[in-house]
Amino acid sequence: MDNSPNDEEPPADTSYTIEAAFPELEFTRPVDLQHPGDGSDRLFVVEQRGIISVFPNDPSIQNATTFLDIEDQVDDSGNEEGLLGLAFHPNYENNGYFYVNYTTPDSTTHISRFQVSSGDANQAEVSSEEVLLSFDQPFGNHNGGQVSFGPDGYLYIAVGDGGSGGDPEGNGQDRTTLLGTILRIDVDSQENGQNYGIPDDNPFAGNEEGYREEIYAYGLRNVWRFSFDPATDQLWAGDVGQVSYEEIDIVENGGNYGWNIMEGMHCFSPETGCDQSGLELPIWEYGRNQGVSVTGGFVYRGPSLPGLEGTYIYADYASGLIWSLDFSDMENPENTELIDTDVNISSFGVDADNELYICAFDGKIYRIAAE
């Protein structure tokens, strides 16, 4: 299947820059951008403080509307705490359900469902909240944050290892905790007194060892952002490293991605053992000479940048570098620096056409443009 938008290849020396996608709009610490999939051509931006704004996907738009305000329920006092993720139900156009991931003042993560107002498509009903899943955060960092529906219709949730440094509680390799994982739940069913169900093919569904059945993959330090490639259904994740390496993973059902045995492709603490049996190593890593905190992105499937078609676009929050990872030869992926920006890139998002956007902590939403 040819996913390229046209048959003409751009010049090999195409260079790229970022430009403000909505020059008149500015947000406070935007951490996520989503579209509702309802044909309305709107975009929703999540602010870490507890606000979700909505606006038409129009570069000339002057103002955004507050869609949801739960600022009084959210604790964003830590750099990695707050309202962190948004996902619209696949049937949002009919049921009006959307899901958020946020940190509460008592250091708990809530995965909650809300519903849009029946009389105003740009206004959510704050009182409609139903908490699906909650878990304690032992430290203020490594809260994960991404929520996203997969092509299978299940809700995937990124959960950090609990925080501090070096995974002091050993959560990454402990399948009896939700921490250090990507979870997968069925939001359209309720089982065992819970507000969700367990997909039958979750790797630990029905186990008798006390493993959490919600787990899809584990051994992850802090997957801040992940995404699905709409052409292949592969789940791509950027896992933030400890002191030496940042990594990119293709996450599969039941995979153990190594933390805290491994950091990237390297033994984290060789003196405590480094048995790599059964571990899934990243497809790419980079060191501290390029950045310190990976921001996972998307496999580009948009119409405007044919030179990037099929490559994974990601960034580093601290250095501002943006790369494209060409994985057409999975044995020898090719990583290319696209843009050296001067902004802190917190997240990527796509619109209904799979066009790519960038959230930055200068308050702007950017897009990539060919020069």
Image (tube, grey):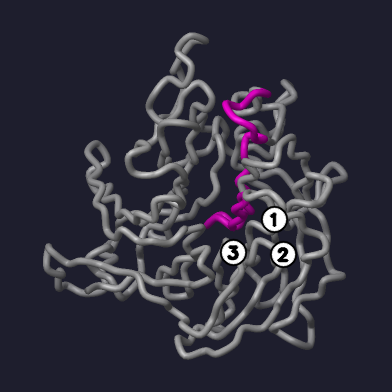
In this view, 358 is above or below 106: below
Of residues 132 and 317, the one nearer the viewer is 317
Residue labelled with disc 2: 50
Give the residue drawn at x 68%, y 39%: 214
Of residues 337 and 184, the one nearer the viewer is 337
Give the residue drawn at x 77%, y 58%: 74
**In the visual, does 208 lie left or right of 337?**
right
Q: Quadrant of the C terminus?
A: bottom left
One can see residue 285 in this view: no
Category of crowding for the residue at label 3, using alpha-carbon neighbours closer than 10 angstroms: few (below 14), some (14–19), many (at least 20): some
The quadrant in which residue 321 appears is: bottom left
**In the visual, does 36 lie left or right of 271?**
right
User: Could you tell me which secondary element the residue under label 1 belongs to?
Assistant: loop
Counting from the top left corner in percent of width and height, residue 37 is at: 56, 74
Q: Is residue 265 magenta?
A: no
User: Could you tell me which secondary element the residue under label 3 belongs to?
Assistant: loop
Give the residue drawn at x 44%, y 50%: 318
**Range of residues picked out in magenta:** 145-169
The quadrant in which residue 67 appears is: bottom right
Q: Nearer the viewer, mark 3 or mark 2?
A: 3
Numbered circles on residues, count = 3
Category of crowding for the residue at label 1, using alpha-carbon neighbours closer than 10 angstroms: few (below 14), some (14–19), many (at least 20): many
Residue labelled with disc 1: 82
Q: Are marks 1 and 3 in contact (CB under 8 Å)?
A: yes
Could you tell me what secondary structure mostly forms the magenta stretch? loop
At label 2, the amino acid type is Gly
Residue labelled with disc 3: 29
| Disc with the residue nearer the chain's start (2 vs 1) | 2
Q: Nearer the viewer, mark 1 or mark 3?
A: 3
Counting from the top left corner in percent of width and height, residue 210 is at: 75, 24
At label 1, the amino acid type is Gly
Q: Are marks 2 and 1 in contact (CB under 8 Å)?
A: yes
